Amino acid sequence: MTTIKKNQTTVRSAPSPAEEERIVRKLSLVGIVGNTVLSAFKMTADLVGHSGAMVSDAIHSSSDVLATLIACIGVRMSRKPSDASHPYGHERFECVANLALGALLLITAFGIGATGIKTILSGNDASLAVPDAIALAAAIVSIVVKESMFWYTRYYARKIHSDAFMADAWHHRSDAFSSIGSLIGIGGAMLGFPVLDSVASVVICLFILKIACDILKDAVSKMLDTACDKKFETELQQFVEKQPDVLQVDLLHTRMFGNKVYMDLEIEVDGDKSLREGHAVAEQVHNGLEAAFPDIKHVMIHVNPSEKGNEPGDDTAAKHEA
């Protein structure tokens, strides 16, 4: 992805479809293979090291394999071109994928939490096995690997503007958090407090619940045509008002459509300009917005004539649709 300057605004060129496809394959491979190997390692550590927290951690890593598959399918579906049935495109498939990812995290969290609470309420500490050192080592390895996978996935998710893979990245981070809980619980159990291993499972549950709620909230927000934040809209307005022949912005509305932005814009130009000249100004603004802000997919521009210099009844309003 290259970055250039245009009209004092940073312009980012979006990755080509071929590059996006390569990145999607790479993220899918890393997520599926990495989580499968890590889950098997954790399960082995549980069998040898007798750690309930490590069982929870292994289940969480197993769910990450499915999460990566869901993200991959969501991204591929969202990249499908517009058709007669979906003239605005398929970007909301990423929101659907995020809803599935959030639901998967919720199920995982409740399962882990229920097991931990049941063990704690049993009150029989003497029956709890004390984890071995291999369980402690597995937790440390998991923290390092999952945190690395988080940063790796997050980097490429931003590069291709993918909410689904960004959610998958946070799924990796939640696994790193859960491994930190496992590390504390296993360490405490080895020091003579076996119940801490189960307490760690409950802490893991809370971490996962928080991330699940954040992912679900973001997905629902983008499916409800929520407006972009004020900072982004201010950047858009400042960019438009810097364009030649634009006197001011009369109206600017944005809405999220999946991970893309749709925009309605009214600009004011000299009322003495002809319809063709007004259309040319709208064309210039439209092209500039698309080049400077790759997340914008659709722009509707209405040109209002400036009252100054206009005779009554003279209306050179024009529309330009991206």
Image (tube, grey):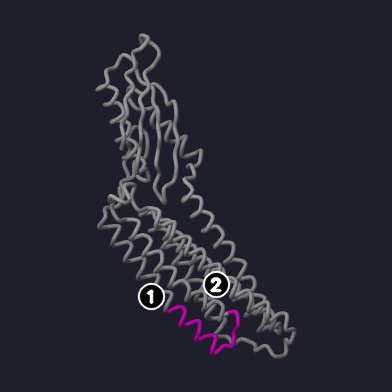
Q: Main secondary structure of the magenta part?
A: helix
What crowding class fits label 2: few (fewer than 14 Cα within 10 Å), some (14-19), or many (20 or more)?
A: many
Q: Do the residues labelled 1 and 2 touch (CB within 8 Å)?
A: no
In terms of image quadrants, where is residue 72?
bottom left
In this picture, which residue range is highlighted in magenta?
A: 37-53
Q: Position of residue 312 (x, y in %)?
A: 37, 9
- Which residue, as the protein is rendered here, is positioned at the far front? 85
Residue drawn where x is 43% and y is 32% of the image: 237
In this picture, is 96 found above or below 319?
Answer: below
> Is 276 left, or right, of 109 in this rendering?
left
N-terminal of the two: label 1 or label 2?
A: 1
Q: Where is residue 286 in the image (x, y as percent from the top left)?
A: 32, 34
Q: Residue furthest right?
A: 123
Give the SS element for disc 2: helix
In the rendered image, residue 205, in percent from the top left (x then y), is placed at 61, 70
Residue wearing tag 2 = 108
Residue type at mark 1: give it.
Val
Q: Name the residue under label 1.
A: 33
